[in-house]
Image (cartoon, rainbow, N blue to C red):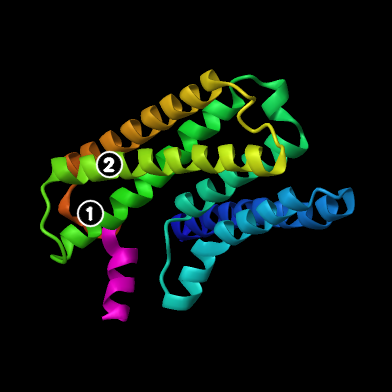
Amino acid sequence: MYKILSKFLDLALHTFLAWFLKLSILALIPYLIIKGDYLFAFAAVIAFIIAIIPSIIERTYKVHLPWEMDLLISLIIYLHTFCGEILYFYEKIPVWDDILHFMGTAVIAILAFMVVYTFHFTGKLRLTLPFIFLFTFVFALAIGAIWEIMEFGIDQIFGRNTQHSSLNDTMWDLIADFMGGLFASLIGVIYIKKSRPLERLKFTRPLRMIIKKKS
C-alpha cells in the first residue's frame, strides 16, 4: 500500500511540475503581446503547443507516456523561453545556449531512438542496433542544423541577433548538438543491450499501443 501511495504521489508531483512549466510558457504570451514583441509571442505559442503534445497524444490514443519525457520536454522549452529570453540567461550566462543545445538535441535523439527501436521491436522495420544508433544520431544532428538555419533566417528577416553575428556561436551550437545527439544515442544503445526483455517491452509499450490503434 505504501509503495502504491508513494508512486501515486511521485507521479502527481511530476505532473504538477510539468503543467506548471507549460502554463508558465502560456502566461508569457499576453505579456509579450503587450510588450509588442509579436515574433517572440508567436514563438511562445509554438513552444506551448510542442509542450502539450505529450498530453494530446495521451488523450487521443489513451496511452500513458513516460512522465520523465513529458517533464523533460516542458523543462527544456521553459529554460529556453522563460529563463533564456525573459530572464536574459542567454546574455548573463555565456554557455546557456550551448547547454540548451546539448539538452535539446539529446531529447530529440531519445525520442527518435524510441520511435525507431519500437518499429524494429514490433517488426515494422528490421534494423541492426548500430544502424538505429546511426539514424538516431544523424537525425538529431540534422534537427540541430535546421535550427541554426532558422536562427539565421530570423536574424536576416527580422533583424534579430540570435546568432550574435558570429560564426563561432553557430559552430559551438552545432558542436553542442553533436555531443548531445551522440550522448543520447549511445545511452539508448547501452540501455537496449543491458536491459532485460521485460524492460524493453515497457520501453516500447506507449508507441506500440499507438501503432496498434492506428492499424
| Image quadrant where one finds the C terminus | bottom left
Q: Bounds of the magenta span? A: 204-215
Which quadrant of the view contains residue 174? top left
Q: Are marks 1 and 2 in contact (CB under 8 Å)?
A: yes
Query: Which residue is the site of mark 1?
Result: 117
Q: Magenta stretch: residue 211 in it? A: yes
The overriding secondary structure of the stretch rendered in magenta is helix
Amino acid type at mark 2: Gly
Q: Earlier in the sequence, mark 1 or mark 2?
A: 1
In-front residue for pair 53/9 = 53
Could you tell me how far apart the alpha carbons at marks 1 and 2 are, in whole angstroms?
9 Å
Where residue 51 sits in the image (x, y, percent)? 57, 56
Apparent side of residue 201 relative to residue 83 in the rendered image (left or right): left
Circle 1: residue type:
Tyr
Q: Could you tell me if residue 116 is visible in this image?
A: yes
Residue 21's place in the image compared with 4, above or below, is above
User: Residue at point 58% right, 42% down?
Assistant: 153
The quadrant where residue 87 appears: top right
Residue at disc 1, secondary structure: helix
The residue tagged 2 is 188
